[in-house]
Amino acid sequence: MVVEFIAQQLGLASSLFEEYRWGVDERNFTYHRKQIREFYGFRELTAKDNELLTEWSHGQVQFTHDIDYLKNQACSLFRKWEVEPPSIPF
């Protein structure tokens, strides 16, 4: 449904979505992610960000073990830090 909506806005066939090469090693995919980050003012996750997230999570786990809550809070941190969240489930 989302794909069809966006395709309609762009005046494209939604079937093009299936043709897009989603692999991380694909140059277009990497280039498009970079363009999106730049447009929204985000940056890639760094080792320092990972350290900060680890420190934050250690502080949070003592209060809750609700994984969904912690994931949502981590996503909020990524938005606050203007960092692209990991593309793998965390």
Image (cartoon, rainbow, N blue to C red):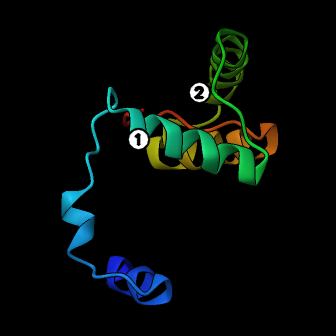
Between disc 1 and disc 2, whose residue precedes? 1
Q: Position of residue 47 (x, y in %)?
A: 65, 9
Q: Nearer the viewer, mark 1 or mark 2?
A: 1
Q: Is residue 79 visible?
A: yes
> Which residue appears at 40% of the width and 41% of the height?
29
SS under mark 1: helix
Q: Amino acid at mark 2?
A: Val
Q: Nearer the viewer, residue 1 or 26?
A: 26
> Which residue appears at 25% of the width and 69% of the height?
16
Q: How many marks?
A: 2
The quarter of the picture where the C terminus appears is top left
Q: Which residue is mark 2?
A: 61
Q: Position of residue 7 (x, y in %)?
A: 39, 81
Q: Position of residue 28 (x, y in %)?
A: 41, 41
> Which quadrant would residue 43 be assigned to in this image?
top right
Q: Is residue 87 visible?
A: no
Q: Nearer the viewer, residue 56 or 27?
A: 27
> Which quadrant would residue 54 be assigned to in this image?
top right
Q: Which residue is mark 1?
A: 28
Q: How far apart are the alpha carbons under marks 1 and 2? A: 38 Å
The quarter of the picture where the N terminus appears is bottom left
Contact between labelled residues 2 and 1, with CB atoms less than 8 Å apart: no
Q: Position of residue 61 (x, y in %)?
A: 59, 27
Question: Residue 79 vs residue 88: left or right?
Answer: right
Q: Is residue 38 above or below residue 25?
A: below
